[in-house]
Image (tube, helix red, strand yellow):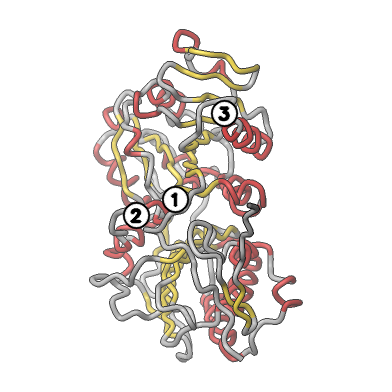
Amino acid sequence: MEESVPLNNTPVSGADRRIPVTLLTGFLGAGKTTLLNKLLHHPDMAGAAVLINEFGEVGIDHHLVDKVDESMMILDSGCICCSVQGDLVKALKNLAQRSSTREIPPVTRVVIETTGLADPVPVISTLTQDWFVAARYQCDGVITVVDATHALQQLEHHKEAMRQIAMADRLLITKCDLANTSYRSELDRRLDELNPGATRIEVYQGRVSPSSLFGCGIYSSAGKQTNVAAWLGEAHVQNRGTIAIGSGPVFVRRKKRIAASRTSSGAKGHHSESVASFVINFPDPVRWYNFTVTMGRILQNYGSKILRVKGLMNIAGDSLPRVIHCVQDVAYPPTTLAKWPEQSLFEDRLGRLVFITRDLTVEEVETIRFELSEQQNRTSATLPSIAACPFPTRCWLAHNMNRGGSTAFKVDGWNVQAIHLRSK
């Protein structure tokens, strides 16, 4: 039977009509509110909607054009400012419905500001797992604001700070003028370990262009060549341990012990941790549904120790590379690049996953490699096994049809084509 794969995954350069969503996060005191106060009134924010926790935290009164209700206001920049009021799904649904009925101006993008102690993972899960939301919104990227004077202490004592940085596509470094050179150097080394692929932008007095926030992920490169090397942090990855599927015993190289050390401020951490990166190569194309179920189980079992998984996969029956991106136990919806990168780690067109992990033992790495190797030997997934797909990657099966182009896809050997009938 022919391998079951979607025929028309929407390429990154294709027409995805969903509203892009940027998640703005950062630990307490990092400067998100100052940044938002500047950002909300920027002319380039016209058509954008900003979802915040409390109106009172940002100065919007003298910029108000129209007050739609207690939770929604329109600013003179053309930006729509919404109070989330604890229910993100409800806020996104309300925004989509009001925009479609022209009760408010059409929304072109959304920025979600989280609280300082918020774990970004549930927000990303909402964007990928809720059917109504996922059909209308796509995750454009994650921006994390990092305090250059206190980030090291926050990383030592708060797991939320680590998750916020690990998830980021871009890091906005604030208070750079207040940090001494040695502290900043140590912070940069720590960021290199937690998220080598994220672009870093220094922010002064909260001033940042909206262009620095939007289009930051690999999913938002419509009309331009995707920089896969930059997204992966390839310069850091190339020196990491490489594990080939079907190889012998696994040894994770360049495993660096990050011990709590005395910082320039005199603070001393209370624990240490082990952050490692390794790459798994796939010499042959993989079966999509088998790979989906296997990765779902891996994320389910080891998600707390996996900071990030990035890569491109060669999928059986699909000539284009499929983007894989996971953070802890959350999998981003997959998408397809318009072509294989010509000059990068992937120029050989082999599937390759980059793992960035914390406190993952060599035995656990071996188990992950074995499971990814064994999925190739299983028979094609049946409908019951697809229905039982682990939650972390269930969205991979729900988002495998092109939303902006052809509606044809293949499943279990059948070629399905949707037909739209028009009444005369």
Compare residues 420 and 163 and report the one nearer the observer.
Answer: 420
Instruction: Using the image, determine if residue 114 lies above or below residue 314.
Output: above
Contact between marks 2 and 3 (CB within 8 A): the answer is no
State how far apart marks 1 and 3 are (Cα).
54 Å
Query: Amino acid under label 3?
Result: Arg
- Where residue 342 appears, as percent x and y from the top left, is 25, 72
Instruction: Using the image, determine if residue 45 lies above or below residue 243.
Output: above
Q: Residues within 10 Å of mark 3 (few under 14, many from 20)?
A: few
Compare residues 98 and 217 and report the one nearer the observer.
Answer: 98
Compare residues 15 and 79 and report the one nearer the observer.
Answer: 15
- Where residue 68 appears, as percent x and y from the top left, is 60, 18
Secondary element under disc 2, as helix, strand or loop, is: helix
Report the residue marked by disc 1.
Answer: 260
Q: Which mark is residue 102?
A: 3
Report the residue marked by disc 2.
Answer: 192
Compare residues 418 and 11 and report the one nearer the observer.
Answer: 418
Secondary element under disc 1, as helix, strand or loop, is: loop
State how far apart marks 2 and 1 are (Cα).
16 Å
Q: Nearer the viewer, mark 2 or mark 1?
A: 2
Q: Residues within 10 Å of mark 1 (few under 14, many from 20)?
A: some
* N-terminal-most mark, 2 or 3: 3
Name which residue lies at 46% across and 84% down.
285
In the image, is 341 to the left or to the right of 137? left
- Where residue 157 appears, as percent x and y from the top left, is 53, 43
* N-terminal-most mark, 2 or 1: 2
State how far apart marks 2 and 3 are (Cα).
45 Å
Name which residue lies at 40% across and 78% down.
319
User: In which image quadrant can residue 11 be found?
Assistant: bottom left
Name which residue lies at 43% across and 23% down.
40
Query: Amino acid under label 1?
Result: Ala
